[in-house]
C-alpha cells in the first residue's frame, strides 16, 4: 500500500478535439486548432520575373524549328573546324571522330550522326590501312568556300558594321573578346584582328591588346536602321511625325493574350521620347516623369540596332551581356527582351537562348537576305536533305560518278554502315588506331 502511494502516478494522454498539438508532434506548416481555425491565409500576388515570363511566353514554332536546324549546322561546322585543324590530311578516322562527341555537344553517337547526313559526310575505307575514314563531300566544301568568298566580298560592309558598333559605345571603344564572340554573327573572318583592324588603320586603332577604338567618327553612319522603317511609315501610311518619330515595328505573336489597357500603354510607349543609340548619352533622371521608361526604351533601341547589324538578325542572349558596359545598358537584358514580345523573340532550343528580331523574319526565313546568309542557307538546305535522294546525288570516288545500285537497292560500300553505327561503342584496336593518328 505504501509502495503504491509513493510511486509516481503517470496520467495517460486524453485525446480531445480541442487539445492543442505539442510542438514536437506538430507539422511544419500552420497547425489546426481552437484559436486558428477561422484564420484566413493571406493571398500572395504571384511574382513576375524574367524566368516566369520566359516560361509563359508564346512560342513561335517557325523560329524554334529554324533554331533546331541551325544547332545541327553548328555541330557540323564545329566538326569541320576540328577536321581542318589536323595537318595530316583532309580526312579523319571515324574512331578519332568519336572522341569529339563531348567537344561538339552531340547527344547521339558520332557514327549515327554521320550516317544521317550522307550529303555532308563521306565515309570510305582507307586505301592502304583499310580503316574507316570520314571527310566532307565536295558539295559541302564548295558551300563553305562560298561563305568565305562572300565574307571577303562583304569586307567593306563588315567594316561599316564595326564602325557603327563603335559609334554606339559610350567611349568609342569595344573589347575584342566581345567582338570575337559574335564574329560569325557580324560576318567577320577568323583573323579579323589582323586582317581588318590592322588593315584599316585609318578607321580603327588598337588601344590595348584587347581593346579597339574608333579613330574618326563618321556622322553619316550615325543613323539607325529603324529610321528607314519610320520614314517608310511616314510616307506610305501618311502617319504624323509625332506617331512615327520614336516608334518601333510591333509584330505581336499569334495567341498572345492581350490584357485590358495594353494597347493604350503600347501607344503611349511608342510616342515616348528617348536618347537614340548614336546620340550622346544624356543624364536621365529615373525619378522624373517617364524617366525609367525612357531609359529602358533606349536599351531596346540599342539591342534593336545591334541585331539589325548582324548577318542573320539574331544573337545569343548571353553574348549581349558583354556589351552592357560599353553600350551603357544598365538594365536586365533578358527582362527587357521578354517585356517586348512584339519586337524580340527568345528561343530556348538548344543549350543557349537566342534572340531573334521579329520584323526581319517571315515564316522562318530572312526577309532581306544577304550573300553571307544565302551561303549559310544553302548549307542548311543540305542539312535538311538528310538521306533523301542519296542514290542520285551522292557521288563516290574522285570522278564524281553516281554510285551504282543493284536490284536490292544496295550500293558498293554499304557494308560500312554496321561498322559505322558500332564504332562509338567498340574500339578498333591495333594498327587502325596507330594508322589514323
Image (cartoon, helix red, strand yellow):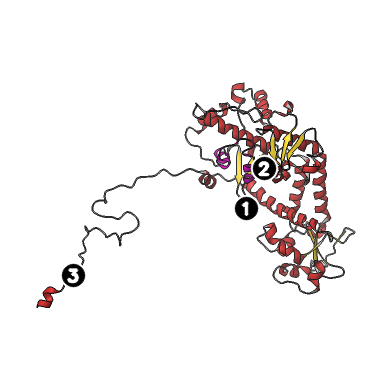
Q: Earlier in the sequence, mark 1 or mark 2?
A: 2
- In front: 50, or 409? 50
- Residue 265 lies, in percent from the top left, at 51, 31
Residue 270 left/right relative to 129 = left
Residue 9 left/right relative to 161 = left
- In front: 161, or 6? 6
Say which mark, if any, is on residue 314. 2
Q: Which residues are magenta?
A: 315-339
Residue 206 left/right relative to 303 = right
Residue 361: in magenta span: no
The answer for how far apart the CA atoms under marks 3 and 1 are is 65 Å
Where 28 sits versus 1, above or below? above
- Residue 142 lies, in percent from the top left, at 83, 50
Where 64 sits versus 103, above or below? above
The answer for how far apart the CA atoms under marks 2 and 3 are is 77 Å
Reading the image, the residue beneath label 3 is 10
Answer yes or no: is residue 235 visible: yes
Reading the image, the residue beneath label 1 is 351
User: Is disc 2 placed on a helix, strand or loop?
Assistant: strand
Circle 2 packing at 10 Å, graded few (<14), some (14-19), many (20+), is many
Amino acid at each position: 500500500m505504501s509502495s503504491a502511494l509513493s510511486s509516481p502516478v503517470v496520467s495517460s494522454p486524453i485525446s480531445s478535439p480541442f487539445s492543442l498539438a505539442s510542438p514536437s508532434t506538430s507539422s511544419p506548416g500552420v497547425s489546426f486548432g481552437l484559436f486558428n481555425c477561422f484564420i484566413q491565409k493571406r493571398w500572395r500576388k504571384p511574382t513576375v520575373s524574367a524566368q516566369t515570363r520566359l516560361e509563359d511566353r508564346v512560342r513561335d514554332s517557325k523560329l524554334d524549328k529554324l533554331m533546331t536546324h541551325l544547332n545541327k549546322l553548328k555541330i557540323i561546322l564545329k566538326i569541320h573546324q576540328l577536321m581542318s585543324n589536323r595537318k595530316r590530311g583532309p580526312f579523319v578516322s571515324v574512331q578519332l571522330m568519336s572522341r569529339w562527341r563531348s567537344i561538339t555537344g552531340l547527344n547521339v553517337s558520332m557514327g549515327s550522326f554521320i550516317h544521317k547526313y550522307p550529303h555532308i559526310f563521306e565515309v570510305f575505307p582507307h586505301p592502304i590501312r583499310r580503316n574507316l575514314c570520314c571527310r566532307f563531300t565536295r558539295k559541302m566544301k564548295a558551300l563553305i568556300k562560298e561563305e568565305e568568298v562572300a565574307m571577303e566580298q562583304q569586307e567593306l560592309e563588315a567594316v561599316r558594321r564595326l564602325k557603327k558598333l563603335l559609334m554606339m559605345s559610350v567611349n568609342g571603344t569595344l573589347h575584342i573578346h566581345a567582338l570575337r564572340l559574335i564574329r560569325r554573327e557580324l560576318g567577320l573572318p577568323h583573323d579579323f584582328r589582323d586582317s581588318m583592324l590592322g588593315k584599316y588603320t585609318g578607321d580603327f586603332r588598337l588601344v590595348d591588346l584587347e581593346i579597339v577604338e574608333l579613330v574618326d567618327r563618321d556622322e553619316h553612319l550615325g543613323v539607325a536602321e529603324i529610321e528607314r522603317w519610320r520614314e517608310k511609315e511616314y510616307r506610305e501610311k501618311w502617319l504624323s511625325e509625332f506617331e512615327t518619330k520614336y516608334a518601333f515595328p510591333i509584330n505581336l505573336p499569334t495567341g498572345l493574350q492581350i490584357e485590358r489597357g495594353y494597347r493604350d500603354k503600347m501607344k503611349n510607349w511608342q510616342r515616348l521620347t528617348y536618347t537614340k543609340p548614336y546620340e550622346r548619352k544624356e543624364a536621365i533622371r529615373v525619378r522624373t516623369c517617364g524617366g525609367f521608361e525612357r531609359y529602358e526604351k533606349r536599351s531596346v533601341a540599342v539591342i534593336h540596332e545591334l541585331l539589325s547589324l548582324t548577318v542573320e538578325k539574331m544573337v545569343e542572349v548571353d553574348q549581349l551581356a558583354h556589351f552592357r558596359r560599353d553600350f551603357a545598358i544598365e538594365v536586365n537584358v533578358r527582362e527587357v527582351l521578354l517585356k517586348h514580345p512584339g519586337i524580340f523573340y527568345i528561343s530556348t532550343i538548344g543549350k543557349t537562348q537566342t534572340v531573334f528580331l521579329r520584323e526581319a523574319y517571315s515564316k522562318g526565313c530572312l526577309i532581306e537576305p544577304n550573300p553571307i546568309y544565302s551561303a549559310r542557307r544553302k548549307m542548311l538546305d543540305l542539312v535538311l536533305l538528310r538521306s533523301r535522294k542519296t542514290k542520285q546525288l551522292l557521288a563516290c570516288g574522285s570522278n564524281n560518278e553516281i554510285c551504282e545500285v543493284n536490284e536490292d537497292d544496295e550500293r558498293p560500300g554499304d557494308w560500312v554502315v554496321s561498322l559505322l553505327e558500332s564504332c562509338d561503342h567498340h574500339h578498333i584496336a591495333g594498327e587502325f588506331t596507330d594508322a589514323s593518328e
